[in-house]
Amino acid sequence: MAKAVRGATIGLLQSAARLSRTALAERLLAHGFYAGQDKIMLALSFENGQTPSQLATLLGVRPPTITKTINRLTSQGFLEKRVSGDDGRRAYVYLTGTGEDAIRSIEKSVRKTEKLALKGFDKKEQRALTRLLSKIEANLTGVPFEDEDEGEAVEEEV
């Protein structure tokens, strides 16, 4: 048996991530969204009325990036900014009615892309993949891995 090529796993992971982002971006574009806009929309559908700083932290992007995306979504009619009643320097971002209606299209696009990516995987393989990707994410972020099956944080040695 041939020896595994060093870095092959990370290369496959990068390729799968790139291909899944491309497939999702194509679906989202059909609904008027550009890549990355879906993350803001979904974050606001979970908790409407967040500051740009909160969204940037949640999504792991820089504030200028989030501001540009929020401005574009606002001009598209999906979001609106409201000034805080307590602090006139602080603005909160909310979904508009049009934005709330668009959430279903975004969620449908995500589901279809995931279904395509996981075609041929049984439920056990899907759960295993989710667990493994969660461990990779924990390793790379430095956040302890929380094993849902075990109900506790699992420290991994690096």
Image (cartoon, helix red, strand yellow):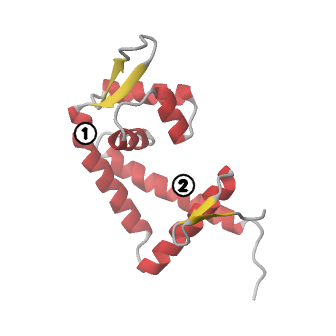
Q: Looking at the image, which residue is at 55% across and 27% down? A: 63
Image quadrant for the N terminus? Answer: bottom right
The answer to whether residue 97 is seen in the rendering is yes
- Identified at 47% across, 27% down, the residue is 52
How far is the residue under mark 2 from the one under mark 1?
28 Å
Task: Specify the farthest residue to the bottom.
Answer: 1
Q: Position of residue 137 (x, y in %)?
A: 61, 57
Q: Nearer the viewer, mark 2 or mark 1?
A: 1
State whether residue 67 is above or below residue 2: above
Q: Give the x, y percent position of residue 109.
A: 33, 54
In this rendering, position of residue 124 left or right of residue 140: left
Q: Nearer the viewer, residue 9 or 80?
A: 80
Residue 121 visible within the image: no
- Location of mark 2 (residue): 18
Task: Please name whichever residue, 28 or 93, is drawn nearer the observer in this view of the structure.
Answer: 93
Left or right: residue 114 versus residue 97 is right
Q: Quadrant of residue 113?
A: bottom left
Q: Residue at x 40, y 14 (%)?
A: 86
Of the image marks 2 and 1, the number of the one nearer the N terminus: 2
Q: Give how far across and how far down residue 30 sits, in percent.
A: 30, 46
Query: Mark 2: which amino acid?
Result: Arg
| Numbered-mark total | 2
Tell me, for residue 53, which label it has, or none. Answer: none
Label 2, secondary structure: give it. helix
Secondary element under disc 1, as helix, strand or loop, is helix
- From the image, tell me which residue sits under label 1: 100
Crowd class of label 2 (few under 14; some 14 to 19; many from 20; radius 10 Å): few
- Residue 83 sits above or below residue 99 on the image: above
Q: Is residue 130 left or right of residue 13?
A: left
- Report x, y in % for residue 5: 76, 72
